[in-house]
Image (cartoon, rainbow, N blue to C red):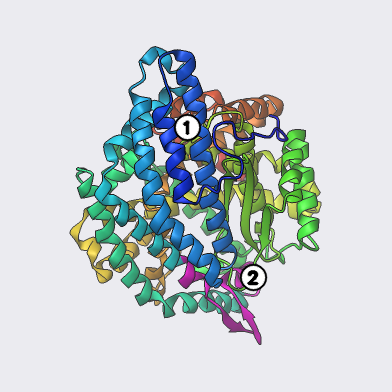
Amino acid sequence: MDIYKEYPRQFIDQNDYMGDIEKIKPAYEMLDGMKVESKEEAWTWMEAWSEVTSAIAEVQDKSYFNMTRDVNNEEIEKEFTRLVQEVVPVAEELDEKAKQKFLSFPEEWVPDDFSIAKMNSKWDVELFKEENLPLISQDMLMRKEYQKISGSWETEFNGEKKTPAQLRPYLESPDRELREKAWRAIVEMHKVDYDKLNDLFDKMLPNRKAVAANADMPGFVEYKFKDYRRLSYTKEDVKAFRDAIKEYVVPAVDKILERRKQKLELDSFRPWDSQADPDRAEPPKIYDDIDDLKDKVAKVMGSIDPQFSDAFKLMDKKGYLDLENRPGKAPGAYMMTFEEERISIIFSNFVGTSRDFDTLIHEGGHAMHGFLSRHLLKQAREVPLEFAEVASMSLELLARPYMDIIYNEVDRERIAIKQLENILIFLPFMASLDEFQTWVYSDPDGASAEKRAAKWRELTAKYRPSTDYSGLEKEDQLGWQYLHVYEVPLYYIEYGIAQIGALQVYLRSLDDFDGAVKDYKHALGLGSTVSLPELFEAAGVKFILKHPEVLEDMTNKIMKQIGL
C-alpha cells in the first residue's frame, strides 16, 4: 500500500467546498452531461463519480468528527445540523440519478471488480424514495441528540467529577466494594436519563418504520438488511447463528464465569464483577501518557507489519488521533476514513486502562483496512460491515505475540487468557442485542417502554444466565439503551460474524503467522471487489453463516487454550 500517495481532484475544482449545495449541483450536472459511449469512457465517468462522492463524504465526516470532539460547541453543532438538514438530502437525491446512470452501463463496460458495487447501487436505487429524505435527516438529528445526552454524563466520585469512561477503570479493581460503587455510579448517570432516552427511541421507532414502509419493505429489519447490503445471508441464517451461540458458547461462558467466581471466592457473580481480574491483580498501568501509548502501539503494529506502523505514525503526524477522554466529548470509539484524502482517523475516550491498548489496536485494524484499500475508487472500497470488523478484531489477536511491548511477563500471561475469555463472553451479549433489535422493530410490543425493558431482562436470562441481576432488575433494563441501537440500528450481528472470522485468523497464525498476516492484508486490500464469503476465503477463513459447523470446533479450541 502507498500511504503517502495523494489524490488531487481531476474533475472538480480543487477549491470547491463540497458542503455547499451550489458546488454540489454543478458537480452532478457534470456527471450527468459526461459522454459515455465506450468502456474507457465508462471508467472515466466512474473515476469522476468517485471523486465527487468522496469530496462530499469528507465534508460530512469531518463535521461529524468535530461534533463528537465537542458536543457542547454550538457553532460546530449548527454546521453539522445544516449539513444533515440541507445538504445531505440534496446530495443523496442527486447521487440517486448518478447510480441510475451507472446501472445503465452495459455489463461489458463495468469491470468485474465493480460487480458488487453495481449490486449495491441497484439495492440503493430500489430503496431510495424521495419522501424518505426528510425522515432520514430527522433520524440523523435524533442520533445527535443521543450523543448530546450521553456525552453530558458526569458525576461526583470520591470527591472528583468523573465521566462514565473515567469510572470504568475502577471496575477492574480487586476491591469489590469499590467496583460496586463505580458500577452503581455509572448506572445512576444513565438512570437519570432513562426516560429521556425512552422518549427519544419512541420518536425514532415510528420514524424508522415509516422509512421502511415508504421503501415498500415489509419492515425495518428487512429494510436494514438491504440498506446494509447483506447480499450473502438471510434473517434465518442470523437466527441460526444466535441459536448456535446459545448452544455452544453460553455453556462455555458459564464455565469461564464459574472459574472466575471460584477464584474471586464469590457466592454469586454480579455485574460489577465482570471486569475484575480473577487473580485479584491490580489493573496494570501500561502507559505514562497518550504519547507513550501511541509509541507502544506503533511498535506493536510495526512488529506485525512495518507498513502498519508507518500508517499509524502518519495519522498521528496529521493530528488524526483524538484519544483521551474529556468532558463534553461524545462517548465511545470509532474510526473513519476521510474519503477524499483517503487517510483514516481514530476517535476514542482513553482513561489509562489496558483496555485503551485493545481499543487502539482494534480501531487501528479498521484504519489499516482504509489504507490497504485506498487505491480503489470509493464505490469499490465500501467494505461489507461484517468484514470491516474482521480487520479490527484480527489485528487485536495478531498483536498477541508482541504483548511484551505493553505488559510485563506476569501480566501478559493472565491478560492473554482474559482476552480470549472476553471474546467468548462477548458473543452472547452480541446475540442478545441483535435479538432485541430484531424484536423491537418486528413486534408491536416494541413500541412500549415497559415491554422493551421486560424483553431485555428476558434476553439477559437467556444469554447471560451466570450473571446475577437479582435486585437489579431496574438497572439491568438500561442495557438495551446502547449506542448502536440509537446510532446504527440493527448493526451488531456484524461483530459476531467478524469475531468468528478473526478467531480463525488467530488460530491460523499459531501455525503460520506470516502466512496469516499476508492473507489478512490481501483480503483487506480487496475492498468490496468480491463477495462477502470470498473476502473471508481470501483471508484464509470460513464465513460462519455458511459454515455453522465452525462455531463448535472453534469454541472448543479456545476453551482448550484457556485451560477449560
Please give the count of numbered marks on the rendered protein: 2
Residue assigned mark 1: 49
Residue at 31% from the left image edge and 51% from the top image edge: 133
Instruction: Give the crowd class for mark 2: few <14, some 14-19, many >=20 residues within 10 Å.
Output: some
> From the viewer's perspective, is 251 left or right of 164?
left
Q: Position of residue 79 (x, y in %)?
A: 50, 62
| Magenta residues (range) | 147-175
Amino acid type, residue under disc 1 in the picture: Trp
> From the viewer's perspective, is 421 left or right of 532?
right
- Eyeballing the image, is 154 above or below 218? below
Residue at 72% from the left image edge and 67% from the top image edge: 282
Which numbered disc, 1 or 2, marks the residue that appears first in the sequence? 1
In front: label 1 or label 2: 1
Q: Quadrant of the N terminus?
A: top right
Question: Residue 204 magenta-drawn?
Answer: no
Say which quarter of the image contains residue 274.
bottom right
Q: Position of residue 508 (x, y in %)?
A: 62, 29
Residue at 61% from the left image edge and 73% from the top image edge: 327
Determine if residue 279 is in view: yes
* SS of the residue under disc 2: loop
Instruction: Give the crowd class for mark 1: few <14, some 14-19, many >=20 residues within 10 Å.
Output: many
Q: Disc 1 and disc 2: Cα gap in Å? A: 39 Å
Determine if residue 251 is in view: no
Of residue 10 and residue 95, the one placed in the foreground of this image is: 10
Of residue 298 and residue 546, the one placed in the foreground of this image is: 298
> From the viewer's perspective, is 223 left or right of 498?
left
Residue assigned mark 2: 326
* SS of the residue under disc 1: helix
Amino acid type, residue under disc 2 in the picture: Arg
- Eyeballing the image, is 456 above or below 136? below
